[in-house]
Amino acid sequence: MHADPAGVLTGSHFLDGDHACCEGALAAGARFSSGYPITPSTEVVERFASRVPTVGGTFIQMEDELAASITLQGAVWGGAKAFTVTSGPGFSLMMEHIGLAIMTETPCVFVDVQRGGPSTGLPTLPAQGDMMQVRWGSHGDYEIIALCPNSPQECFDLTVTAFNYSEQYRVPVFVMMDEVVGHMTEKVVIPPAEQIEVTPRRYTTIPPGEFLAFEPKDDLVPDMPRTGEGYNVHVTGLTHDNRGYPDMTPAQQDKLVKRLCNKIRQNVDKITLYEADQIEGADVAVVSYGITSRVAQRAIDLARDKGIKVGKFRLITAWPFPEKQIAEIAAKVKAFVVPELNLGQMVREVERAAAGKAVVRHVPHAGGSVHKPEDILQAIMEVAR
Amino acid sequence: MTTIGITPTNPVEPFLRTDRMPHIWCPGCGIGTSVNSFARALTEANMDLKNVAIVSGIGCTGRVAGYMKLDSFHTTHGRAIPFATGLKLANPKLNVVVYSGDGDLFAIGGNHLIHAARRNVDIKVVCVNNLIYAMTGGQTAPTTPGDVVTSTNPYGTYDPSFNLPYLVEAAGAVYVARWTAFHVRQLARAMEEMFTKKGFSFIEVLSPCPTLYQRRNKMGDGLDTMKFYKEKSRIKNGAPTNEVALSKSGEIIVGKFVDRERADYRDLMHDQLEEVLGDQYVEAEACECSI
Ligand SMILES: Cc1ncc(C[n+]2csc(CCOP(=O)(O)OP(=O)(O)O)c2C)c(N)n1
Ligand code: SF4
Ligand SMILES: [Mg+2]
């Protein structure tokens, strides 16, 4: 299905990543956002607050992120496409409701514009320190989808993708930006509405009375009922059966939690997005994501100038992690170089997928700025030797 | 298990998910009794049940949503109100009722409650106040009166407690009433009246938890508590809410305390945006998003 033209600001613009993300949400059909201000993410909802009354929708500023992260879920069950936006401390407060969205299969989007942590850390400066938190921060076992834009254009594009994935798989999807991507201004091309693919909500066509609210379809995802149409749907964060009724037995826990994970795991090939360049014949592969991939590009160019055979692998989906692709590359290259704005997060996944077949060299950075390309270059040169 | 409230032949049966019976509530618990009044109110108010949604937090009272044959949402501890806020704003045709416990609504969820009242979001809140955290085994709640034995105050409580009607009125609610599990008719009538109000409305239902409150404090069982409520209650409609605080064994002031008009959140939003944006304003009707 195509985007509703009302929300699409077709044209060529100069936008920062935060504003582009907002336009992506509007293009994807988001008509509801509940937020709580926090640097460096607030511009997303500020723009939404200014735009959405002219499109037909609602922004509400909540009393905190605990509220923001569940108000949007109420709106989703009310029929809206909805999202919230935050950064470090706010993201920490949202963790319980990420679990709720997973358990209740509520399609929704969370944007995290990452800043330096822990705690209040570096409110105005970048980091990529929430990459494991987004994967594991809520309690229990689950799978989510997380996307990592590296430009304002991708903040637009991937926010649309995030909404589409959330509707397809009925799972919260995360747009993992960082302060630099959020605040950098670049050209953003917004296509005409008819060129933007939008995934509609999977509303059931089965009438009330016959419909089992959590009975999975072939892709392991259940269709959704509409609220206010007599379905008498019951939605609970407790372990539940296909009717949505609490069933707190080990057997049902096993069935439900495995399905919630498998609906992502089984579709990983359809979900995974990445950018690979000159991997064939490379001795070294640089694995990076978000803003760090832009700095890494500079290091890759410098290394190639020196005659080193360097390939580039950019994670667009950090989660599910492109395990298969990394394993394949591990069999071909001598080493991976993994720069990221944290002291070792996604590198663990690279190590796991590489399974000892290639050296994995991390290039850590505690956040607050981006890497120096020379530091990445240095690592490339060392492992290429 | 049976309670005073719900039996299989009860007229409230059509409102219940009978396929989920028996329920988890103890004999003598007041929660089922309040549900009985709620079901009666739905009938008396002639509510179109398709458009009634119920949202609960977590607790013994939080289980109410799961037993009602309505669109029903059992959310997280303390957050029923913000969930209900999103549901109502996205789908204004719904009558959204929040049904939860005193701990859920006034401890962990207290901030959300006062802000929803301040905004005057059009949701109806029923608080079953059993003066305790029941689900987790009888710990002190912000409603527990002084000198009461709880599992976390084994030598008696000393934390000052909230006076719920006073707090909710100050925060901006348009309707505030209190009844007890003894006053089933008055409670049903208050709930019925609450459905006619537009804006943040609140009913406190003082309710026994014989298992964890009354017995531990040698106040008897469910029936003894009914006698206690009957003896101690005084109906005082319009009572100033600063005078209705509860104590362990003092008078229980019940009645309708607040009934006033104030533009609700959607009207406020609509009027402001329309005034400033004029023709550019596109009203967020039920955002039944087609996409
Ligand atoms: C975040 C979180 N903290 C704590 C709990 C544990 N918990 C469940 S119910 C409850 C108290 C419920 O008390 P109340 O709202 O008064 O409901 P009642 O059981 O008395 O009806 C608590 C503390 C929880 N479920 N979630
Ligand atoms: S523990 Fe108390 S509140 Fe919970 S069901 Fe039993 S009597 Fe009711
Ligand atoms: Mg209680």
Image: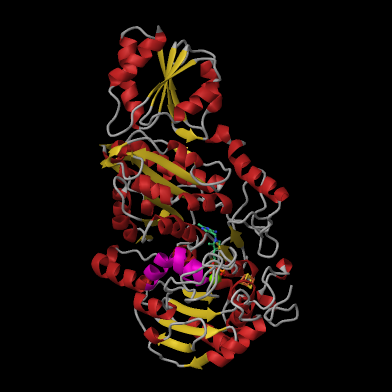
Q: Residue furthest front?
A: B155
B4 in relation to B84, above or below = below
A329 in relation to B264, above or below = above
Residue A367, image quadrant: top left
Ligand 2 lies in which image quarter? bottom right
- How many numbered tags mark residues here? 0
The colour mode here is: secondary structure
Query: Which of the two residues, B164 or A244, is positioned nearer the viewer here?
Result: B164
Is residue A195 visible from the viewing direction of this image? no
Query: Which of the two residues, A247 or A174, is positioned nearer the viewer here?
Result: A247
Determine the residue positioned at 57% across, 32% down.
A269
**Where in the figure is residue B134, as x and y percent of width and height?**
58, 68
Q: Is residue A321 magenta?
A: no
Classify the position of the C terminus of chain A by image quarter: top left
**Where in the figure is residue A325, as x and y percent of width and height?**
53, 23
Is residue A96 visible from the viewing direction of this image? yes
Q: Does residue A33 appear to the left or right of A11 in the view shown?
A: right
Determine the residue positioned at 66% across, 55% down.
A240
Query: Which of the two residues, A19 or A88, is positioned nearer the viewer here?
Result: A88
**Where in the figure is residue B169, as x and y percent of width and height?**
38, 79
Question: Which range is magenta?
Answer: B89-117
**Where in the figure is residue A214, as x and y percent of width and height?**
64, 54
B93 in relation to A216, above or below = below
Q: Is residue B110 magenta?
A: yes
